[in-house]
């Protein structure tokens, strides 16, 4: 979706069917103005409460961690689960921060590191594929980067048109434009012309344009080949970035890492293995802040059983 095709407000959003969405967005807006330390405590409390009401989500977190880190002790894994549950609630507030905070407040809470890599690539006229992972605070990281440098986010329109309107408005603040994830030609054009494109290859997007490659201890993780497609067609630089919250200070560090070297062009399988290694490094910057509640390994090779199926009694 290009900027000119941004969703517009419609009076139909005032109909009763959209009231829950409007109330949710209003609550997010109002909560975003609370002092940060209150948002931090309230978010953790909400995360714990919501997971009690949604036990399947908690089970997904537990399953993903057991699959990825089989050598981790039960005590270590339980501690990581509890931290991740609290961070899941805080993500609601961090999204509100990204959508509604003024630039000054974002700058006060987020420190950028590694921008020299971005400036160098920019001076060379090189397109940049900013490789993200789905950390809970990804929205805030993208907003903080956008204050300093324009970028284009890969965007999946929401099926709820009212929420989609507010999501688009929030995500396109501070020098950010959005492009529909189906618009591959648009992404390639942007990269070829030296633009910055945000891209997250760490989720399971299904069998289309995918292959199976190792991720942590899981031998066959369904991995998008979209990274290869974009990199091969545009000869862009791939720049991993991470955003990590310091739990003690409430400050965030957005770090742009050095561009990936020796990317295996024209080899989708080798590229998937290579990218998953980079994904692992990014996740391990703060594993407790990663979106483990996503069923990352739901797509299996033909003949392999579902990894999330309940064991037979």
Image: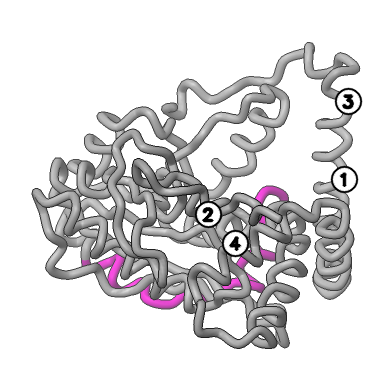
Of labels 4 and 3, the one closer to you: 4
**Which corner quadrant of the image does residue 22 belong to?**
top right
Task: Compute the Cα span from label 3 to label 1.
Answer: 12 Å
Q: Is residue 63 left or right of residue 196?
A: right
Residue 126: percent from the left, percent from the top? 18, 55
Q: Pointer 3: what residue?
A: 19
Of labels 4 and 2, the one closer to you: 2
Residue 193: percent from the left, percent from the top? 20, 42
Question: Which of the two labelled residues, at mark 4 and mark 1, occupies the earlier sequence position?
Answer: 1
Question: Which of the two labelled residues, at mark 3 and mark 1, occupies the earlier sequence position?
Answer: 3
Q: Pointer 1: what residue?
A: 27
Q: Quadrant of the C terminus?
A: bottom right
Q: Is residue 9 left or right of residue 295?
A: right
Q: Nearer the viewer, residue 293 or 286?
A: 293
Compared with residue 124, is residue 186 higher up or lower down, i.e. above or below? above
Instruction: Write the start and end of the magenta stretch as one range.
Output: 98-120
Way the structure is coloured: one colour
């Amino acid at each position: 979706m290009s900027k000119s095709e941004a969703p517009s407000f419609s009076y139909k959003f005032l109909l009763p069917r959209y009231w829950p969405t409007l109330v949710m967005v209003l609550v997010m807006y109002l909560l975003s103005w609370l002092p940060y330390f209150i948002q931090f405590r309230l978010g953790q409390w909400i995360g714990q409460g919501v997971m009690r009401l949604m036990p399947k989500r908690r089970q997904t977190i537990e399953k993903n961690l057991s699959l990825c880190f089989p050598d981790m002790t039960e005590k270590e894994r339980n501690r990581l689960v509890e931290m991740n549950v609290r961070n899941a609630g805080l993500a609601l507030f961090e999204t509100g921060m990204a959508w509604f905070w003024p630039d000054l407040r974002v700058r006060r809470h987020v420190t950028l590191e590694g921008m020299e890599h971005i400036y160098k690539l920019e001076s060379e006229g090189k397109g940049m594929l900013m490789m993200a992972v789905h950390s809970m605070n990804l929205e805030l990281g993208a907003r903080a980067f956008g204050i300093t440098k324009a970028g284009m986010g890969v965007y999946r329109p929401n099926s709820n048109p009212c929420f989609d309107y507010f999501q688009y408005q929030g995500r396109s603040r501070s020098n950010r434009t959005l492009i529909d994830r189906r618009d591959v030609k648009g992404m390639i054009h942007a990269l070829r012309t030296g633009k910055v494109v945000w891209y997250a290859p760490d989720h399971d997007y299904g069998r289309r344009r995918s292959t199976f490659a190792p991720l942590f201890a899981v031998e066959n993780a369904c991995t998008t080949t979209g990274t290869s497609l974009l990199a091969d067609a545009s000869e862009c630089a791939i720049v991993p970035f991470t955003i990590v919250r310091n739990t003690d200070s409430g400050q965030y560090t957005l770090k742009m890492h050095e561009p990936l070297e020796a990317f295996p062009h024209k080899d989708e399988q080798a590229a998937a293995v290579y990218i998953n290694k980079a994904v692992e490094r990014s996740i391990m910057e703060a594993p407790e802040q990663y979106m483990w509640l996503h069923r990352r390994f739901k797509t299996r090779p033909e003949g392999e059983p579902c990894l999330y199926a309940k064991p037979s009694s």
